[in-house]
Image (cartoon, rainbow, N blue to C red):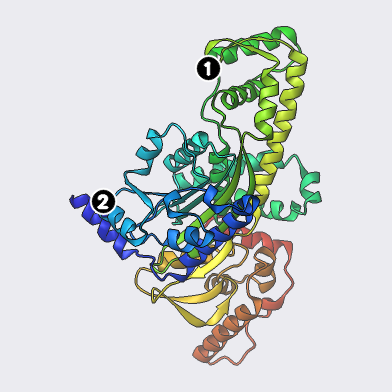
Amino acid sequence: MVSNLLISRKKMEKSYLGDRTKEKSRELLRYFIRGNLILSTEKPENHSVLHLPGPESREVIEVYDKLGIPRSNVTGIEKIPDFAAQALSATPGMKVECALLEEYVGRQKKIAQSIISLDFDKEFSQQMSRLVNEICSKETAGSFVLHLAVTRQREKAKRQMFFLEPVAAAMGKLRKHEDILRLRGLWGQFQKLVWKYDNGHMKAAMSMGFTMNLLNSIKEGRGEAPADGISLMESSLSKKLPGISGAAIARYAKILAAAVSASKTGTAKEIRAFAGYQYVSATATGMIGGIALVENRGRMKHSYDVLLGTVELGENGQVLRIADAARFLKLADEISSATASEQMRMFEWALEPREKLGSSGKGALKPARDMTAIGRKFKLGTGAKEALKVACLQNPDALPLDEALEFLKQGETIGAIMEVFPATNEKALRKLWNEHLRGERKKNGDEGNGFTALDAPASEEDVDSLKRHFENR
């Protein structure tokens, strides 16, 4: 009871009623559902919803009511009894179940809702990733929308690695595809990201990390072929094709495991569209979200089924024999190639700039006069330091002016700063620097013109020097 009261108090302090950026995120969700799901059927009553309503149940009013989805088709999961009652009172006709989401999903053999919206008031985690995967593995709708929103905090080293592992994996694959990246106009972005990632610049890569984790959670198969089955398959391939390398056999074993999983559980997923967003709420909470249109039993499921036609399976998915080794290898290569193509699409979505919905600071963040490259420069109010850091993440190619000023004081040039951080507001930086110089001259009684190196062209040494600063941050 005490625990529930503490949770209730915390949630009431974080009420999103009247929060304009939260409203924008719901508007984005509504447009995504209408454009990618409902327009294809033109029958909103054919769709149903599973979501986390909260006590105010604003998502029902601002999204599903406006889309024409009957409230009888909307199911809300709320763990606190008082909030469940308030949600039902706010939106009569909706189904509300008082339970933990993990418990509710665990009890379901199948999930039939075509819209899943999970707006959490906590950080993305491995547990959340597993939950998303379980929902997707139980989803029976041919096409469905999955929406996930989480808080965005300053991450510790261990959690940074959780975010960045899928980015590293994607970059490892894509380094081999320079021609494809050039063709799609992504090579410059890719190089910039690689430099930031390799040199410890986590801001852009962390944003990518959330997207890659979410999309990988959707696509990941839960089941896999038993280890003894994989071993039998490996020995079968080795005997039929003695020239094949151990690494290649291991790769094909992995593909076969995914094939068995897709065949037995129907978890093959194809992501058809994706949209990302971020904002700072009225409670100074940084939020990051992703919305995906997911297709069930698509092209990859068909490919897996065809692949399994070349394999004789025993009970529990054990691989007894490769019926046609040459055809198996050809199909496995095709699936591997298709998987790389999917990875490319996911990487492209992760590279796309998130829609920035702004900030509803309500006193926690007070706009100052000077404009910066990241939007507004904020004066800190109580508890707003983290929110400011989140706001600064909105444009990773811009250097906040206070940091840029510090580098100028250390002898760096504007040219070097603009080379490394091209989106920095150069005009505002010059103004800030001139004000600093005037203050220094007034203090020292010096009428000189300041540092002549300020406008010098950026040399390689300048840029390298500035990069080293950031490597050691």
Q: Quadrant of residue 423?
A: bottom right
Q: Quadrant of residue 259?
A: top right
Q: Residue at x 65, y 76 (%)?
A: 426
Q: Earlier in the sequence, mark 2 or mark 1?
A: 2
Question: Cβ–Cβ below 8 Å for labels 2 and 1?
Answer: no
Q: Mark 2 and mark 1: span between their CA atoms?
A: 42 Å
Regarding mark 1 in the picture, which secondary structure is present there? loop
Residue placed under numbered mark 1 in the picture: 226
Determine whether the residue tagged by mark 2 lies in a helix, strand or loop: helix
Instruction: Name above or below for residue 407 compared with residue 54.
Output: below
Instruction: Please indicate whether residue 163 sits to the left or right of residue 415 in the image.
Output: left
Total count of labels: 2
Between 384 and 281, the one lying in front of the other is: 281
- The answer to whether residue 297 is above or below residue 309 is below
Q: Amino acid at mark 2?
A: Pro
Which residue is label 2 attached to?
81
Residue 187: mark? none
- 14 lies left or right of 145: left
User: Which quadrant of the figure has residue 16?
Assistant: bottom left
- The answer to whether 123 appears left or right of 374 in the picture is left
Q: Position of residue 59 (x, y in %)?
A: 44, 59
- Closest to the camera, between mark 2 and mark 1, is 2
Crowding at mark 1 (Cα within 10 Å: few <14, some 14-19, many 20+): some
